[in-house]
Amino acid sequence: MKYLMLIYGNEQIWGSLPAGDLATLIGEVDAFNEELRARGELVDVQGLDAPARSVRMAGDTPVVTDGPYLEAKEYVGSYFVVDVDSEQRALEIARSYPGLRFAPGVGGGIEMWPLMIRDGVEN
């Protein structure tokens, strides 16, 4: 089964990290990704660049706004997709993400979403 892992963070906290700490965290995340890749479990991993945009209907017209969250302190900074045998394995991977334990309050959190299966075929 495939799972989408959304990595949340706080821009002020990330921006205030000393350069050495940020480099250490990036190295730990790169090693984490390489381990998943070597196991054949990593499908995709990407950082997201700001600014995000939201497109919603306002009456009959699609309107583009900054967003998706107007007052959010946390934002989705990156994601990765894994293909694993069970939800338990996906949770194990999410719990082991280095950013969660790097420093209190720095790592934000991870949202884990199972990807849909349509007509018996995984997307």
Image (cartoon, rainbow, N blue to C red):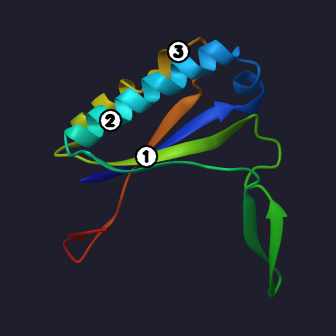
> Between disc 1 and disc 2, whose residue precedes?
2
Label 2: few (<14), some (14–19) or many (≥20) C-alpha neighbours in 10 Å: few
Whole-angstrom CA distance, mark 3 to mark 1, is 18 Å
In which quarter of the view is residue 34 placed?
top left
**Can I make out residue 44 in this image?**
yes
**Can I make out residue 91 in this image?**
no
Q: Is residue 17 left or right of residue 82?
A: right
- Say above or below: 46 vs 65: above
| Residue under numbered circle 2 | 34
At label 3, which amino acid type do we have?
A: Phe
> Between disc 3 and disc 1, whose residue precedes?
1
At label 2, which amino acid type do we have?
A: Glu
User: Under tag 1, what secondary structure?
Assistant: strand
Q: Residue 61 carries which label?
A: none
Whole-angstrom CA distance, mark 1 to mark 2, is 12 Å
Q: In this view, does 54 lie to the left or right of 119?
A: right
| Residue under numbered circle 1 | 80
Q: Position of residue 2 (x, y in %)?
A: 29, 54
Instruction: Look at 20% across and 46% down and name the residue there.
Output: 40
Instruction: Look at 22% across and 39% down and name the residue there.
Output: 38
Q: Position of residue 4 (x, y in %)?
A: 41, 50
Q: Residue 102 carries which label?
A: 3
In which quarter of the view is residue 36 placed?
top left
Circles 1 and 2, Cβ within 8 Å, touching? The answer is no
> Between disc 3 and disc 2, whose residue precedes?
2
At label 1, which amino acid type do we have?
A: Phe
- Say above or below: 6 vs 107: below
Whole-angstrom CA distance, mark 3 to mark 2, is 18 Å
User: Under tag 3, what secondary structure?
Assistant: loop
User: Under tag 2, what secondary structure?
Assistant: helix
